[in-house]
Image (tube, rainbow, N blue to C red):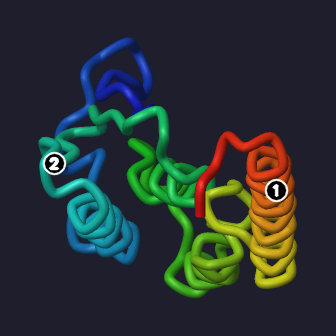
Amino acid sequence: GGAAAAGGGGGRERTLSEIVGSGSAASDMYAFGVLLFWMNFPERDLPVAGTWSLPGTTDANLRSLLERLLDVNPANRPSASDALVHPFFTTSFSDRLVASGEILRQDDKLEAVRALIKQVRHLHSQNKEKIAVDRLNGKLVS
């Protein structure tokens, strides 16, 4: 999920410029977080003043990076170089899909195809035997 806009000392609401970090590297990282959010969730409302949410199916690495980039406290946001070494950028997209089970590794695909071929051959063999028995019993005319 996201962070609430409330925070800071004395229980007062933080201003947008306090959250974003006006004119600093932290504000650039917040803007990058908004851009990354929009690129991945164009149908959702943009994060505003620290309030935002993500679908439950969001990639854990993306969620983690967005949580850091959109942190209401500018001091907690990563630098650009820290963001670039975040697992969201250092782990390949295909590795994440394999890890999540959404796609199979090449060896797993081959094994699945082999198993399917074996099953088809077995069913075909059973069908041929049934046809032969039916012919012997006069149930099939060829």
Q: Which of marks 2 and 1 is nearer the N terminus?
A: 2
Q: Name the residue under label 1.
A: 132
Mark pair 2, 1: CA separation: 68 Å
| Residue in the picture at 59% in, 64% down | 142
Q: In this view, does 115 lie to the left or right of 62?
A: right
Q: In this view, does 121 lie to the left or right of 141?
A: right
57 w.r.t. 8: above or below: below
* 42 or 49: nearer the viewer: 42
132 w.r.t. 3: above or below: below
| Residue in the picture at 30% in, 75% down | 28
Quadrant housing the N terminus: top left
Estimate how packed mark 2 is, as few (under 14), some (14 to 19) or many (20 or more) residues with alpha carbons within 10 Å. Answer: some
Q: Where is residue 95 in the image (x, y as percent from the top left)?
A: 71, 76
Q: In this view, does 45 lie to the left or right of 24?
A: left
Q: Position of residue 49 (x, y in %)?
A: 21, 39
| Residue in the picture at 22% in, 73% down | 23
33 w.r.t. 50: above or below: below
Q: What element carries label 2?
A: loop
Quadrant housing residue 38: bottom left
Q: Is mark 1 on a helix, strand or loop?
A: helix
| Residue in the picture at 68% in, 83% down | 90
Q: Mark 2 points at which residue?
A: 46
Badges 2 and 1: C-beta atoms under 8 Å apart?
A: no
Q: Which amino acid does label 2 sit on?
A: Leu
Q: Where is residue 34 in the image (x, y as percent from the top left)?
A: 25, 61
Q: Position of residue 108 (x, y in %)?
A: 83, 72
Estimate how packed mark 1 is, as few (under 14), some (14 to 19) or many (20 or more) residues with alpha carbons within 10 Å. Answer: some
Q: Residue 45 carries which label?
A: none
Q: What residue type is labelled 1?
A: Ala
Q: In this view, does 91 lie to the left or right of 58?
A: right
**Which one is in front in this view, the residue at disc 2 or the one at disc 1?**
1
